[in-house]
Amino acid sequence: MNINLDSSSATQATDLLVNLEQQEVRFWLEGERIKFRAPEGVMTGAVMASLKALKPQLVAILAVREQQETLPIDTENRFVAFPLSHVQAAYFVGRQSVFEYGGVGCHGYFEILAPCWDKAKLECIWEQMIIRHDMLRAIITPNGEQRILPSVAPFVIEQVDVSSETVRQAMSHRVYQTDKWPLFDLKISHQNGKDCLHFSIDLLIADFLSVQILLAELFKGYLGQTFPAAPLTASFRDVICYERQQQSGRAYGDARQYWFSRLPTLPACPQLPTCVQLPTGSPSPAMQTNASEIPRFVRYRHQLAPSCWRRLQQGCQQQGVSPSAFLLTVFSEVIGRWSENRHFTLNLTVMNRPNIHKDIDKLVGDFTSVSLLEVDLRSPKTVYERVKQIQKQLWQDLEHRTFSGIEVMREWGRQQGVGHARMPIVFTSALVGEGKNQVQEAISETQLDLVFDYGISQTPQVWIDCQIMVLQGRLQLNWDVMADVFPKGVVAAMFSTFIDSVERIDSVECIDSIECIDRVKCLCMEEVGTGEALCDSPLFWHSALSLPLPESQQQRRKQVNATEKTLTPRCLHDGILARAAQQPQAIALVDPQHCLTYAALITRAQALAAKLNSHQRYAVLMEKRHEQVVAVLGIFIAGSAYVPVDIHQPPARILTILSDAAVSGVVTASPQACLADAHFREINLSLLAQIPDAIEAKILPLPHDLAYVIYTSGSTGQPKGVMISHDAAYNTLADMQQRMALTPDDRVLALARLSFDLSVFDIFGVLGAGGALIFPDEGDLQNPARWAHDIAQHQITLWNSVPAQMKMLTDYLRAEQITLPSLRYILLSGDWIPVNLPPAIAQIAPHCTQLALGGATEAAIWSNY
């Protein structure tokens, strides 16, 4: 064929083909017509216009390609055993029960309802298909090779007189003996006035597209349409042998080098909450699976409304991204929300049918490959930026897919350990062609009254397989999940968030509900109009993806947070004054040398108040001891606010805080050297006389007045003062007093330094309820043996500390085999709580309730419970 092509247009046509083929578009000729199969969203209006403009050049290029088909056809050795593909080999090995999360075959199961299935007609068509498709006669030998049987016995479709559910239980998780034919099964059951065709197949012999081919041919043949007359000249065996030969070529070597260079920085899989402790970087003993207990899979499924699916396609097309890339992005964001690591690797299923023969899209076999996709959610990005980022990475990886993801994982496992190379979170997109798959087209052409009622897939070592496909005009979203891997409710919540996030693009939302990242762009864009879907708005694409909470969690949060009550504003010390009037001789403060009643505490506090002025700020600078409580209470009685300063800080930092807080004086328990040359008034509690008979009346603070200023390090490392009013802190304390039902019988071990706001609860929460504070000696603040002694001696009921201190105590008590039955509540906050700490606490304090709290200092001690 001699066709004179303008070099410029020929180059354009070649570049266009290469670019589109890198995006998984496949082209072939039928006469002079260009046919293609492409992922959804790739063939935009602009691309179609380019194809039309360059059609003569494209036809010539494709014609030359077909004349130079590179797939060798080996009919002579058609029935000789040949190797498994990398994915087949992984499935074959992974089905062994000795492997972690093994004992399961790679299997697909489908149920198709019809008013009536003609068993004889189905058997006749299926028999022809067994002859047409070699892999329907395939077996896998025990040594890990596959072989096509020259002939097989007639296959009989069993018509069973049991419920569809019974058949489903028997067939849906079947593990075939791979060296025994057949590796598929079909049965017919009848229930509720309809027939159900049950179809089970080992996915070692057929990928998703192969299943489509088989069902499409079955449905067309069933209606009496002409069965494909043209025999298949190529075979799956030819393709596998060809790919093995290509491994010595340059493309394979380049792809291998690409992935080897990626391995040092490729992150691990998502660290999701599971029911087992997972290794993350080193080999671990295999989890033995009882061969009689086949792991079960559960399907979570949802169909998108046709209007929502159309809007999604339109929105993606306008932005120049594919629906697959958008849905992959949403899936990644959902996984990222539940994952400990926001930088992880997903396992992507790739339909790898190389364009090497005209029959390639008609063959049955497992052409599946996998590709590892790096996802980095650590920095905020707009929806458009995130989709583009993921799509770009995906296309770059697919350019090097000749070195398969299975080979990458094997090498990764050798370098960093089997645990690090585990990739159990999978994304599978079957969005191809013009929005229809072959099964859908067959149903439409034959007008058969068929309904796909149920389906489930399973894969060894896979925990979640997210599958997206178009079925009967609707976008089908499935998650096939290995049961018992995740805690109850986790996957249901994740799937609910995934579906809500996808469907939200068709909703009409208020602009204020969108978190806009790129304000400059958004200000230049039109706002969402009445009745306009989010995916049609530029604002949606240039804002962060907002993941809604699952409905069940929203309702639970509403219930848990329904705590609003009318609260009479009070000052922090009002409760202490009231308790002192009611129980003056009750014990308030205890340390190794002192024991103060409420009456004595008030007397000393009033003595200090007599030396102070109202509406000022006074620093408290002393060791951790009972005098700290005297100081802060005296400052409150004087109508002022306190500024706690850690005495163990460097003198320069102390002076910086005192200056920044503009304190009117510093309350101490002994002379402080750092104040010797400073211009701050020092009030030494040890030098104060008893309260005089007549003292100057003080202006009492009001609830909205400043109570204390606590200095934190701040984001820059410089001290930053946080100002908290009486009513803000009292709101927190009143809530906690009620939740824990605090009484005068409660005792707390006062471990928190005054400059840490946990001390606010110890002082005003416990004393305000009439309880007592027990102070360890300053030298014992890090001594768990002394803590245990004090808890037992004083029958302490409350513990309030950071998790590290509680871990010190539990480690000591477990080593000494001591328990603390007096503890009612343990409050932990200020840091991450190790997951193994709560069970350890339960051993040493069997009767206590554990509370995990948190919140910034600005939120008045705690803001989450």
Image (spheres, helix red, strand yellow):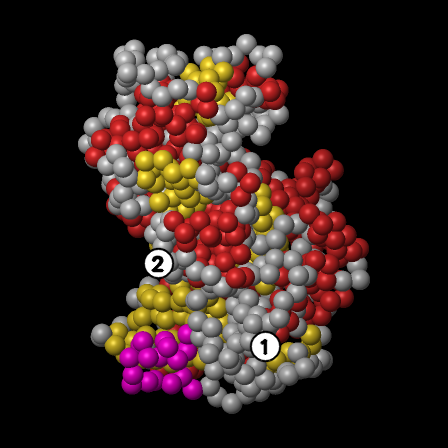
Q: What amino acid does circle 1 point to?
A: Val
Q: Position of residue 198 (x, y in %)?
A: 38, 75
Q: Position of residue 101 (x, y in %)?
A: 54, 70
Which numbered tag is attached to residue 98?
1
Q: In this rendering, does residue 658 appear at all?
A: yes
In reply to whether residue 160 is colored magenta, the answer given is: yes
Q: Which residues are magenta?
A: 156-172
Residue most extreme to the bottom: 153
Q: Position of residue 14 (x, y in %)?
A: 68, 43
Question: For the point 49% across and 12% down, which residue is it?
Answer: 681
Callout 1: few (<14), some (14-19), or many (20+) C-alpha neighbours within 10 Å? some
Question: For the point 78% across and 56% down, which residue is it?
Answer: 253
Q: What amino acid does circle 2 point to?
A: His
According to the picture, the residue beneath numbered tag 2 turns out to be 847
The foreground one among 789 and 469 is 789
Task: Determine whether 788 is above or below 454 in the image.
Answer: above
653 to the left or right of 184: right
The foreground one among 830 and 484 is 830
Callout 2: few (<14), some (14-19), or many (20+) C-alpha neighbours within 10 Å? some
Q: Which sits earlier in the primary sequence, circle 1 or circle 2?
A: 1
Question: For the point 51% across and 81% down, which residue is it?
Answer: 291
Task: Determine whether 536 is above or below 145 in the image.
Answer: above
Mark 1 → mark 2, Cα distance in angstroms = 42 Å
